[in-house]
Image (cartoon, rainbow, N blue to C red):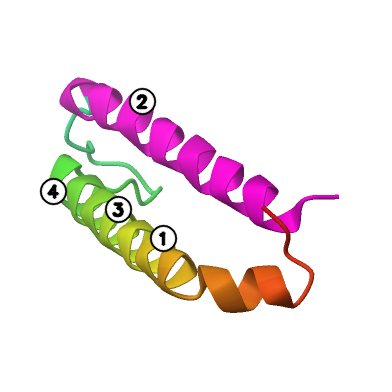
Amino acid sequence: MNKYRDLMAAVALVRTALDEAKKLHKKIQEPGETDWRVPGRDEVDGAHAKAAVELTSFHAATVKWEKELVSKGWRV
C-alpha cells in the first residue's frame, strides 16, 4: 500500500470538497427567529477559511516531511 500517495490523494479530495462547498455559501440565508441555532453566512465563511488554511498548512508539512515519511514506509 502506498500510504503517502493515498494521503496526498485524500488531501486533494478534501481540497475539492472545500472548493465545492464554497460555491454553496452564496445560497445561505440568514437564520430566522427559531429555537434552533443555525450559523449565518459569515460564520460559515469563517469556518471555511479556517479549514482551508489548516489544510494548506497540513499539505505543506507533509510535503516538507515527504522524504522522512517515505523512508519510514510511506512509499510514493
User: Which element carries disc 1, helix, strand or loop?
Assistant: helix
Q: Which residue is mark 4?
A: 42
Q: Which residue is mark 1?
A: 59
Q: Residue furthest right?
A: 1
User: Which element carries disc 4, helix, strand or loop?
Assistant: helix
What amino acid is found at the position of numbered circle 4 in the picture?
Asp
User: Which element carries disc 3, helix, strand or loop?
Assistant: helix
What amino acid is found at the position of numbered circle 3 in the picture?
Ala
Label 3 or label 4, whichever comes before in sequence order: 4
Work out whether 25 lies above or below 7: above
Where in the figure is residue 65, as x and y percent of width and height?
50, 75
Where in the figure is residue 11, as x and y percent of width and height?
51, 48
Q: Which residue is mark 3?
A: 52
Work out whether 67 lies above or below 36: below
Residue at 23%, 41% in the rendered image: 33
Quarter location, residue 60: bottom left
Most common secondary structure along the magenta stretch: helix
Label 2 or label 3, whichever comes before in sequence order: 2
What amino acid is found at the position of numbered circle 1 in the picture?
His
User: Do labels 2 and 1 touch, CB within 8 Å?
Assistant: no
User: Which element carries disc 2, helix, strand or loop?
Assistant: helix
What amino acid is found at the position of numbered circle 2 in the picture?
Glu
User: CA gap, disc 4 to disc 1?
Assistant: 26 Å
Mark 4 vs mark 1, foreground winner is 1
User: Do labels 4 and 2 touch, CB within 8 Å?
Assistant: no
In the rendered structure, which segment of residues is drawn in magenta?
1-27
Binning the other alpha carbons within 10 Å of mark 3 as few (below 14), some (14 to 19) or many (20 upward) gives some
Mark 3 vs mark 1, foreground winner is 1
- Front-most of residues 4 and 58: 4
